[in-house]
């Protein structure tokens, strides 16, 4: 990969809070999912579920559950994405992992194991989601400052799906970015044993 592409995904990529007034076409969202669905998860479990809030009305539904500091950047984003997970993802394993029919039982019991598997793998998929969005020319603004219980009641009333995090999507206004914050050096957080 070229340096420019790596810069786009990692080095120069930023989390955005301010957005240009530019629409995101449905085809881009479809392409985004088509990239993400091919990324690895435990036993190909694919627990992530996505809701794209694009209309003003749909964004108003999430507004009461946002932390105060997240309201403006979320309401002005072209799309607010709810990254969620299917708490009963294992029901789909016969389709997604057909060569090992016993995997459904392995990943569904005990329930705490299923919950952590769903959460961990939807988080992993959410990371792929953000990288894929950047690769397609979008900017992202991920956040966890919201009331998960409220969002779940509003958007997933049957209780099967659970929100993991939110991610605003759009074309960021680079003129309003803050300076990049410090990062750890390799020697501060890594060990080779």
Image (cartoon, grey):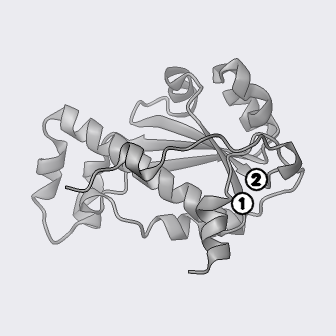
Which badge, 2 or 1, comes first in the chain's sequence? 1
Which quadrant, please, contains the C terminus? Answer: bottom left
Residue 118 lies, with reference to residue 28, above or below; the image says above
Residue contact at pointers 2 and 1, CB within 8 angstroms = yes
- Secondary element under disc 1, as helix, strand or loop, is loop
Q: Which mark is residue 138?
A: 1
Q: Which mark is residue 170?
A: 2
| Residue that appears at 54% across and 49% down | 50
Q: Nearer the viewer, residue 81 or 14?
A: 14
Q: How many marks?
A: 2
Is residue 30 in view?
no
Provide residue 155's location: percent of width, then percent of height.
Answer: 56, 33
Say whether residue 10 is left or right of residue 72.
Answer: left
Provide residue 44's location: percent of width, then percent of height.
Answer: 29, 63
| Residue that appears at 25% across and 50% down | 90
Is residue 51 in view?
yes
Which quadrant, please, contains the N terminus? Answer: bottom right
Q: Which mark is residue 13?
A: none
Q: Nearer the viewer, residue 150 or 5?
A: 5
Residue 152 lies, with reference to residue 105, above or below; the image says above
| Residue that appears at 42% across and 52% down | 186
Say whether residue 72 is left or right of residue 70.
Answer: right
The image quarter in which residue 166 lies: top right
């Amino acid at each position: 990969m070229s340096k420019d592409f790596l810069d786009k995904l990692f080095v120069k990529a930023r989390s955005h809070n301010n957005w240009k007034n530019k629409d995101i076409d449905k085809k881009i969202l479809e392409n985004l999912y088509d990239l993400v669905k091919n990324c690895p998860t435990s036993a190909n479990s694919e627990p992530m579920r996505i809701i794209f809030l694009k209309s003003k009305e749909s964004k108003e539904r999430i507004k009461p559950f946002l932390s105060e500091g997240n309201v403006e950047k979320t309401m002005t984003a072209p799309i607010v994405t709810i990254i969620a997970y299917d708490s009963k993802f294992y029901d789909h394993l016969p389709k997604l992992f057909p060569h090992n029919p016993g995997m459904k039982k392995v990943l569904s019991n005990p329930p705490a194991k299923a919950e952590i598997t769903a959460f961990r793998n939807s988080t992993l998929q959410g990371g792929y989601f953000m990288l894929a969005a950047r690769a397609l020319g979008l900017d992202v603004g991920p956040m966890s400052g919201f009331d998960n219980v409220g969002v779940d009641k509003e958007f997933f009333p049957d209780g099967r799906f659970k929100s993991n995090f939110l991610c605003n999507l759009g074309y960021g206004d680079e003129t309003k970015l803050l300076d990049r914050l410090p990062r750890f050096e390799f020697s501060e957080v890594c060990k080779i044993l």
